[in-house]
Image (spheres, helix red, strand yellow):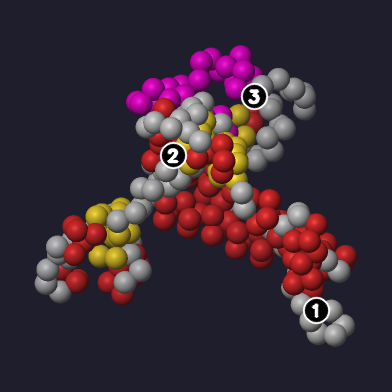
Amino acid sequence: MTTYSKNYRKIYEEHFGPIPVDSSGKKYHIHHIDGDRNNNDPSNLVALTIQEHYDVHFSQGDYGACFMLAKYMKMTPEEMTNIATINAKRRLAEGTHNFINLNQKRISEGTHNFLKKEDGSSLGKEISMKRSQNGTHVWIKNKDSVPCYNKKGVYVRISKEDYYSQTGPMDEWEWAFNTSKEGERRRLINDPSLPLLRTTKGTVPCISKTGETKRITKEEYHSQTGPMYEWEWVFNMSKEGKLRKSSL
């Protein structure tokens, strides 16, 4: 088989013409049929919409790829969490989860904070004390700093002194607290596809009678009357919500 070292999207265009565009103006994804991203043979490349690309990886059980694709799709935070959970469980079952490798290494080196010393005392407590004493504990390092975004969307921690020395409206500050409304706006400058941190506040994750999932405001949720099974929207983890999920 011929080895192709160039960008696979360019390879596709050289052999099949321009990459198709969907109804929203977004270019199709180029999928590697055999799952090997290094195999850029034209016969191994196919153009798919993002939904088709997601469906292929989901059917193959490649939930890691699904999670990455979901970031660019209109998925709810609950759906994103569900995909991440499935992927983590699969990797744990296969023994490939990075936590397993890291923990096994720390256990073999005798540095895992869950280990006990010979006298039965906690090794983790001793490690934390040492880090506190030498100033390397994360709580100490971050104690006098504030996580911020600047006007260009760059994240950095600055000293409390520098942060509180800023005056005027926050939208004019050089540095805005990362989870403030202004900080969140700046966080999206470099990657608009990132989920908002504050969008779920004051809302309830629900499922409708037809199986549609979305968040509605608490006011809308509690305004519903009568038996819960007749409600248009029910809490997704309630007994009725679980029944609706199982009937899909």
- The residue singled out by tag 3 in the image is 8
Given residues 136 and 223, the one toward you in this image is 136
Q: Amino acid at mark 2?
A: Glu
How far, Cα to Cα, is label 3 from label 1? Answer: 51 Å
Sequence-wise, the earlier of marks 3 and 2 is 3
Q: Amino acid at mark 1?
A: Lys
**Residue 77 makes an appearance in the image:** yes
How far, Cα to Cα, is label 3 from label 2? Answer: 35 Å
Q: Which mark is residue 116?
A: 1
Identity of the residue drawn at 36% across and 48% down: 199
Is 19 contained in the magenta span? yes
Identify the image quadrant of residue 21: top left
Q: Height in image: 119 above or below 247?
A: below
Q: Residues within 10 Å of mark 1 (few under 14, many from 20)?
A: some
| Chain part drawn in magenta | 8-31
Identify the image quadrant of residue 121: bottom right
Q: Amino acid at mark 3?
A: Tyr
Identity of the residue drawn at 66% across and 65% down: 93
